Amino acid sequence: MAASIVKSIISAGIVVLSALTPALAATTVNGGVIHFNGSIVEDPCEISPQHNQFALSCPHEGRVQTTQVSYGDALRGHNPYPDVATVSMKYINPEKTLAVLLVNYR
């Protein structure tokens, strides 16, 4: 009798799973066209660390422009090229001797 109940439960489970299988199948698309217009990738900014500042060289309007940014300005979120990237800096230790400079491109 117990074996009969187990077989019934297994059979019911198989029926439910087989009914759900088509709903879980992926949809296949047989073609399509994607058009790109303009620039897809632009060169990243180059960062050259110095003693109390860093040089930030970014492509802007077809030319590379370089500016000096102090680490204090980076801590305050100063952005010399807001159309290209944002610059921020955060200390990663309590002594404030190690920091990470983060550049987020737009």
Image: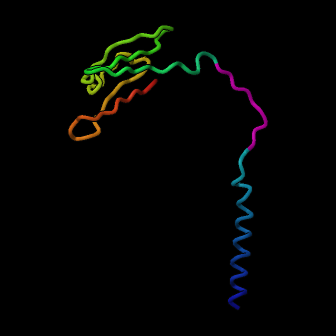
- Tell me the quarter of the picture where residue 83 sits: top left
Q: Position of residue 99 (x, y in %)?
A: 30, 33
Q: Which residues are magenta?
A: 28-36
Q: Position of residue 12 (x, y in %)?
A: 71, 74
Residue 77 sits above or below residue 81 on the image:
below
Quadrant in which the N terminus is drawn: bottom right
Is residue 53 on the magenta stretch?
A: no
Residue sitting at the far right:
30
Q: Position of residue 34 (x, y in %)?
A: 69, 26
Residue sitting at the far front:
51
Tell me: 90 left or right of 19. Answer: left
Q: Foreground: 93 or 103?
A: 93
Q: Foreground: 86 or 37?
A: 86
Residue sitting at the far bottom:
1
Q: Position of residue 38 (x, y in %)?
A: 60, 15
Tell me: 12 left or right of 45. Answer: right
Residue shown at the point (56%, 21%) measured from the top left: 41
Residue 32 sits above or below residue 93 on the image:
above
Residue shown at the point (69%, 71%) measured from the top left: 13
Residue shown at the point (75%, 38%) measured from the top left: 29
